[in-house]
Image: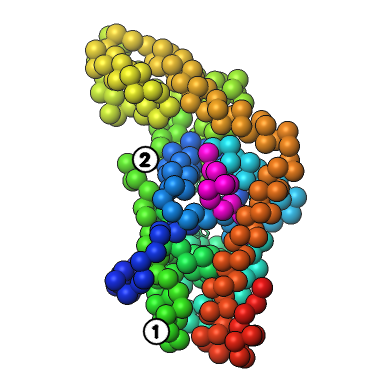
């Protein structure tokens, strides 16, 4: 049963510009599924109002246990996001653990989080059902995620389907806290990213790190070409017309091709009389072209590691300012701060 959520009550909140926030786990290199299914849409929302994007290293601690690897993954995720178009002048990009206020806010929320609500959350429940040991970090993961969202007064949280339940938990906890202590937190709305954007892997299943069927966004071109040439296809004869809608090779090409090229390819499928080698070649070329600018930006950022660290340091200052104000409000409301001065922390 999904967790109960409080009804949306937008009218109770003062009108303010939307504040978009999302967190991205640094658990590996981004693949096309991550980009087309999530990151591209998060980045598009950076123009919608205030925007906060962070690299969720505290969440990653429950799975990445090698410190050097974690540091490398966090840096690489930041480089990749900026290369892919996240604009640090428009949006605040930062690392989750650089804002310690979030950890304190998490404790305030833990104190109003019913065990039953967390027991129903799928990340923990799935692991338990499979008989795997789970740590408290995984169990309380949705509370940390709630603190991430509430610390910035976020109103819109773009996420994939798997995260919608956690936004409901966030709304529940914020609603309970507000009910107990007054209007402290802004209730966020989940923005489900297009479900039509399910990207197939090179074997036709859903693209996923766990299936080892990914095309990585910044994979070097020769190895990407090799992978594309290995994409599984059916054995229908060349002359037979084919429906582009049920072909994963076509779907991958459609993601990176220009509109006229996509159209031309669809016509070719319907006409028949072509070999899949032709489509693969077109896919190699379109993919190289589609990500060329991002690759160049990434090369420039990699040549100047100080640049990305400066962006993250600046982002952390901006994020902390916002989180400190929300935390002060919450401390004051629940009786931790003695007097107004103690409630105001820098
Ligand atoms: P993986 O399955 O490779 O471990 P993640 O679970 O880390 O991928 O994905 C992070 C986000 O990227 C998901 O929340 C989802 O929104 C998006 N995503 C991942 N794979 C795909 C896919 N094949 N199609 C569409 N979106 C995807
Ligand atoms: N749990 C999210 C994921 O695995 C990442 C995340 C952490 C997040 N905190 C968040 C997403 C807050 C949105 C808002 O994808």
x and y percentages locating residue 90 in the rendered image = 53, 48
For the question of whether residue 324 can be seen, the reply is yes
x and y percentages locating residue 225 in the rendered image = 54, 20
Residue found at x 31% / y 16%: 264
Quadrant in which the N terminus appears:
bottom left
* Residue 82, quarter of the rendered image: top right
Given residues 309 and 131, the one toward you in this image is 309
Q: Secondary structure at mark 2?
A: helix
For the question of whether residue 144 can be seen, the reply is no
Q: What distance separates the C-alpha of mark 1 from that of mark 2?
A: 38 Å
* Residue 196, quarter of the rendered image: top left
Q: State which tag comes first along the sequence, 1 or 2.
A: 1
Label 2 CB sits under 8 Å from any ligand 1 atom: yes
Magenta span covers which residues?
85-97
Is residue 89 a member of the stretch shown in magenta? yes
Looking at the image, residue 267 sits to the left or right of residue 188; the answer is left
Q: Mark 1, mark 2: which one is toward the viewer?
A: 1
Q: Is residue 187 above or below residue 311?
A: below
Looking at the image, residue 135 sits to the left or right of residue 289; the answer is right
Instruction: List the residue tagged with mark 2.
Output: 197
Quadrant in which the C terminus appears:
bottom right
Residue found at x 61% / y 60%: 318
Is residue 94 a member of the stretch shown in magenta? yes
Instruction: List the residue tagged with mark 1.
Output: 179
Q: Is residue 150 above or below residue 184?
A: above
Given residues 323 and 238, the one toward you in this image is 323
Q: Are marks 1 and 2 in contact (CB under 8 Å)?
A: no
Number of marks drawn: 2
Q: Mark number for residue 264?
A: none
């Amino acid at each position: 049963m999904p967790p109960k959520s409080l009804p949306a009550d937008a009218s109770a909140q003062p009108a303010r510009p939307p504040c978009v926030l999302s967190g991205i786990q640094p658990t590996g290199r981004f693949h096309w599924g991550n980009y087309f299914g999530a990151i591209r849409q998060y980045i598009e929302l950076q123009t919608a109002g205030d925007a906060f994007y962070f690299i969720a290293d505290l969440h990653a601690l429950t799975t990445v246990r090698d410190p050097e690897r974690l540091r490398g993954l966090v840096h690489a995720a930041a480089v990749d996001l900026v290369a892919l178009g996240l604009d640090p002048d428009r949006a605040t990009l930062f690392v989750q653990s650089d804002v310690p206020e979030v950890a304190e806010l998490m404790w305030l929320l833990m104190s109003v989080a019913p065990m039953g609500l967390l027991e129903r959350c799928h990340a923990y429940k799935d692991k338990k059902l499979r008989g795997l040991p789970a740590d408290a970090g995984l169990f309380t993961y949705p509370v940390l995620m709630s603190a991430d969202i509430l610390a910035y007064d976020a109103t819109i949280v773009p996420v994939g389907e798997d995260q919608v339940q956690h936004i409901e938990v966030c709304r529940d906890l914020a609603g309970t806290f507000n009910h107990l202590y007054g209007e402290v937190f802004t209730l966020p709305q989940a923005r489900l990213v297009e479900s039509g954007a399910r990207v197939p892997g090179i074997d036709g299943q859903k693209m996923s790190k766990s299936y080892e069927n990914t095309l990585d966004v910044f994979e070097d071109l020769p190895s990407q070409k090799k992978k594309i040439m290995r994409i599984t296809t059916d054995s229908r004869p060349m002359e037979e017309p084919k429906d582009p809608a049920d072909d994963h090779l076509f779907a991958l090409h459609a993601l990176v091709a220009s509109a006229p090229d996509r159209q031309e390819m669809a016509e070719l499928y319907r006409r028949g009389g072509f070999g899949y080698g032709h489509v693969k070649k077109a896919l190699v070329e379109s993919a190289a072209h589609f990500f060329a600018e991002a690759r160049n930006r990434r090369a420039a950022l990699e040549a100047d590691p100080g640049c990305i660290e400066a962006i993250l340091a600046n982002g952390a200052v901006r994020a902390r300012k916002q989180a400190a104000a929300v935390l002060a409000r919450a401390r004051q409301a629940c009786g931790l701060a003695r007097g107004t001065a103690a409630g105001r922390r820098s």
